[in-house]
């Protein structure tokens, strides 16, 4: 999932948890732009793509959220 999202959207992505459980992961995704509206749209597209990828892998996304930080 990480590689597909990274290459599909030109973003930074990393596992954030300690991977104590082999079948769970917490992913952090970062995208940068001058345009807030562009970022909002891009994050929605990334979320949709992540759900499609997860479904294809017989996995599920338990929670997702995004935050836009001001300059």
Image (cartoon, rainbow, N blue to C red):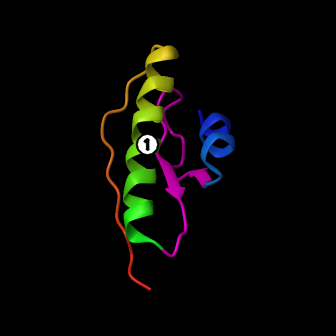
Residue 6, compared with residue 22, is above or below; it is below
Residue underneath mark 1: 45
Would residue 36 be found to the left or right of residue 3 on screen? left
Query: Residue 37 at what x, y percent from top left?
Result: 37, 64
The residue that appears at 69% across and 42% down in the rendered structure is 7
Could you tell me residue 31's position as x and y percent?
A: 54, 62
| Magenta stretch holds residue 18 | yes
Q: Residue 56, relative to residue 17: is it above or below?
A: above
Quarter of the rendering occupied by the N terminus: top right
Q: Which of these two is toward me, 48 or 58?
A: 48
Q: Is residue 14 magenta?
A: yes
Q: Residue at x 50, y 54 (%)?
A: 28
In the rendered structure, which segment of residues is drawn in magenta? Answer: 12-34
Does residue 39 sit above or below 59 in this rendering? below
Q: How many marks?
A: 1
Left-right relation of 7 to 57: right
Q: Judging from the image, what secondary structure is the residue with disc 1 in?
A: helix
> For residue 12, what is the image quadrant?
bottom right
Magenta stretch mostly in which secondary structure?
loop
- Name the outermost residue toward the bottom: 71
Q: Quadrant of residue 55?
A: top left
Residue 14 locus on image (x, y percent): 60, 51
Of the 4 image quadrants, the one containing the C terminus is bottom left
Say whether residue 62 is left or right of residue 34.
left
Say which residue appears at 38% left-offset and 82% top-offset: 70
Label 1 Cα neighbours within 10 Å, binned few <14 / some 14-19 / many ≥20 = few
Query: Taking 38 as reference, is 62 left or right?
Result: left
């Amino acid at each position: 999932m990480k590689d597909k999202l990274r290459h599909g959207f030109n973003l930074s992505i990393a596992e954030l948890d300690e991977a104590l459980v082999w079948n769970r992961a917490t992913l952090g995704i970062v995208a940068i732009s001058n345009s807030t509206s562009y970022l909002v749209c891009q994050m929605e597209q990334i979320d949709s793509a992540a759900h499609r990828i997860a479904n294809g892998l017989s996995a599920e996304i338990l929670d997702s959220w995004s935050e836009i930080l001001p300059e």
